[in-house]
Amino acid sequence: SVKVWDLPQQTVLHSYRAHSGSVTCVASCPGKDTVFLSCAEDSRTLLWDTRCPKPATRIVCSACNHLPTSVMWHPQKSDIFALGDENGTVALVDTKNPDSALSSTVHARSVTGFAFSAHSSPLLASISEDCSVAVLDSDLSEVFRNRSHRDFVKGLSWSPSDDALLTTVGWDHQVLHHTVPLPTGEASGVNCVKE
């Protein structure tokens, strides 16, 4: 089930049972506190609006026909989200026209997470069970790839103080800092630093 919490009060506001399999990812919509996405092992991606009597709407995207594993809203476009699946496909999906999704097979195995950068035209970082991190531009063209992890990559975060710095963590117990080329084409120095 999917639960909506009031964190300061530590109480459950809503509990929804629209998925028939384990929920793998949930993403809240920036600027819209009643809207969020979920995906689950029932192969469904749901768009939620808690103001509606039937709050869940299924998003069917023909470009993503494998089990969805990760979702994240675009930070500047409230109708666009990133969707990753068990086959390594990454898609940018428009909730108003899901079949027009831009997609690319970015990884060889399941996508485990996403993070959009704070750039004016945000870069999308994706991580995977193929032990790699990829950074994509708005056309899903690869601008950076690193394969230094020796096991599943499970977490990532862009630095709040350095637009070019991406940090990843894996099941290999490594925390890696990656210097990603900036969208303006500025050269980067060190590409990967172990911590």
Image (spheres, helix red, strand yellow):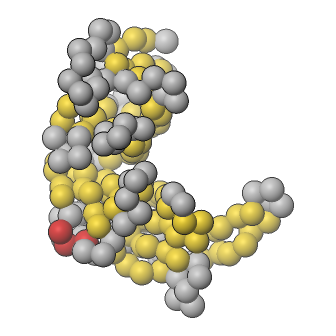
On the rendered image, what quadrant is the N terminus found in?
A: bottom right
Q: How many marks?
A: 0
Along the horizontal axis of the image, is 15 left or right of 176? right
Using the rendered image of the protein, determine whether residue 71 is visible from the camera's viewpoint. Answer: no
User: In the image, is residue 94 above or below residue 146?
Assistant: below
Residue at (34% x, 14% y) in the render: 192
User: In the image, is residue 176 above or below residue 50?
Assistant: above
**Residue found at the very far bottom of the displayed protein:** 53
Residue at (42% x, 81% y) in the render: 57
In depth, the one of 76 and 45 nearer the eye is 76
Residue 168 position within the rendered picture, expressed as x and y whole percent measured from the top left: 43, 28
In depth, the one of 167 and 164 nearer the eye is 164
Residue 88 position within the rendered picture, expressed as x and y whole percent measured from the top left: 24, 48
Q: Quadrant of residue 167?
A: top left
Along the horizontal axis of the image, is 18 left or right of 192? right
Residue 160 position within the rendered picture, expressed as x and y whole percent measured from the top left: 52, 30
Residue at (49% x, 12% y) in the render: 195
Residue at (28% x, 14% y) in the render: 188
